[in-house]
Image (cartoon, helix red, strand yellow):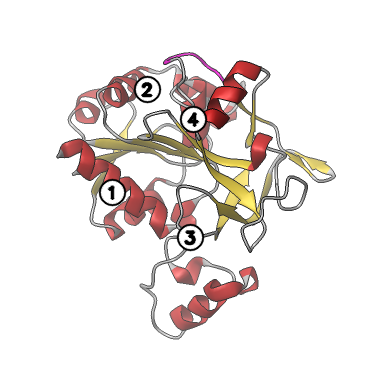
Amino acid sequence: MRVGVVLFPGMNCEHETQRALVSVGVEAEIVRSNQRERLRALDGYVLPGGFSFEDRIRAGVVAAHLPAIEVVARAAEAGKPVAGICNGAQILLEAGLVPGLTPGRVEMALALNESGTRVGYYCDWRWVTGSLFAEPVPLPFAHAEGRFVTEDETVRRAVLERGLVAARYCAPGGKVIRDWPVNPNGAWENAAAMTNPEGHVVAIMPHPERANWAYQVPPDVGGKWAGRKRRSVAGLAGEPGPGREFFERFRELLRRAVA
C-alpha cells in the first residue's frame, strides 16, 4: 500500500504526516505536485497542512485548480482513499471533493474563523468526537480559515442526513457544545472533519499528525492523555497518541481499496 503525501509549494507538514503514516505500517512517500506520473501510480493520497501558495486569494483555492488535483480527483472516483489535513482539507473543499454530493461542485467553504472575540488565525488544542474516533480525543489545530459553512440549505440537509460530519468539536466528556470555547472557530454543526458520501475522501481541520505520539500531547489536556504524556517522558516515547487512530482508519481504507 503506497501512499503519496502530496506536497504543494508552501506546505510545511509533509514530514510529520509521512512519519505518522509509516507508524501504522503504510509505505508513504512525499510527492511534489508537479510529479503527476508518480502520483498516478499510488494507492492513496494525503494532502498535508501548511500554507499552499501562501493562502493567496483564500486558503487552498490555488492548489485546488492545479493538474495534480485532477489526478487525485480521478483516483478518488476510482475508489482510492484521499485525506486532507488542515490546508489539505481546504484544498479538498475548494476542489469539490468534500462533501462531494455533486462531484466537482464547490458546495461548502472553510471560512475565516470566528474565535470568541477574535477573528482569523488561532492555534490550540480541542476535543473532538465522531465516526473517525472510537471515543472523544484531544487534537491540536492551527488555522485561520477553518469554519465549515454553506448557504445552501439543500447541502446542509444532505450532509446531515448522510452523516458526512465525521468529527465535531466537543467538551472533554464528548458533549457537543456549539459555543466558544468548545467550538474554536464557529464551524457549522461544530464540524471538525467531513467526508464524501462514500466515506473514502476525508477533510479534517485539526492536525492528527501532531498528536500521533503521546509525548506530543500537552499535560494540561487532562484525562488519560496527561498520564500517557508522563509515561512517554519517562521513556515510552513510542506510545501512540490521540491522533494515531486517524491514520489507522486511513490504513483500513487503503486495505479495502487494494483488496
Residue extending farthest bottom: 234
Which numbered disc, 4 or 2, marks the residue that appears first in the sequence? 2
Looking at the picture, which amino acid does disc 3 mark?
Ala
Task: Name the residue beneath numbered marker 3.
Answer: 211
**Location of residue 163 with respect to 140 vertically, above or below:** above
Q: Residues within 10 Å of mark 4 (few under 14, many from 20)?
A: few
Residue name at image x 61 percent, y 24 percent: 156
Q: Is residue 246 left or right of residue 178?
A: left
Please report the residue visible at 48 percent of the width from the left and 28 percent of the height from the top. 91
Name above or below for residue 52 compared with residue 154. Answer: below
Please state the horizontal and vertical placement of residue 193, each as a whole percent of the image: 52, 40
Q: Which residues are magenta?
A: 103-108
Task: Determine which residue is flagged by label 4.
Answer: 162
- Quadrant for the C terminus in the image: top left
Determine which residue is flagged by label 2.
69
Residue 249: x %, y % from top left: 35, 50
Rounded to the nearest angstrom, the CA distance separating label 2 from label 3 is: 27 Å
Q: CA distance from mark 3 to mark 4?
A: 28 Å
Q: Nearer the viewer, mark 3 or mark 4?
A: 4
**Three-letter code for the amino acid on which mark 1 is drawn:** Arg
Instruction: Inspect the image, locate mark 4, and give the three-letter code of the amino acid beneath it.
Output: Arg
Q: Residue at x 34, y 28 (%)?
A: 33
Res. 251 mark: 1
Instruction: Find residue 97 and report its horizontal and vertical position in percent.
Output: 43, 24
Q: Amino acid at mark 2?
A: Ile
Q: Which corner quadrant holds the N terminus? A: top left
Q: Earlier in the sequence, mark 4 or mark 1?
A: 4
Q: In front of the other: label 1 or label 3? A: 1
Foreground of the two, 74 or 64: 74
Q: Secondary structure at mark 1?
A: helix
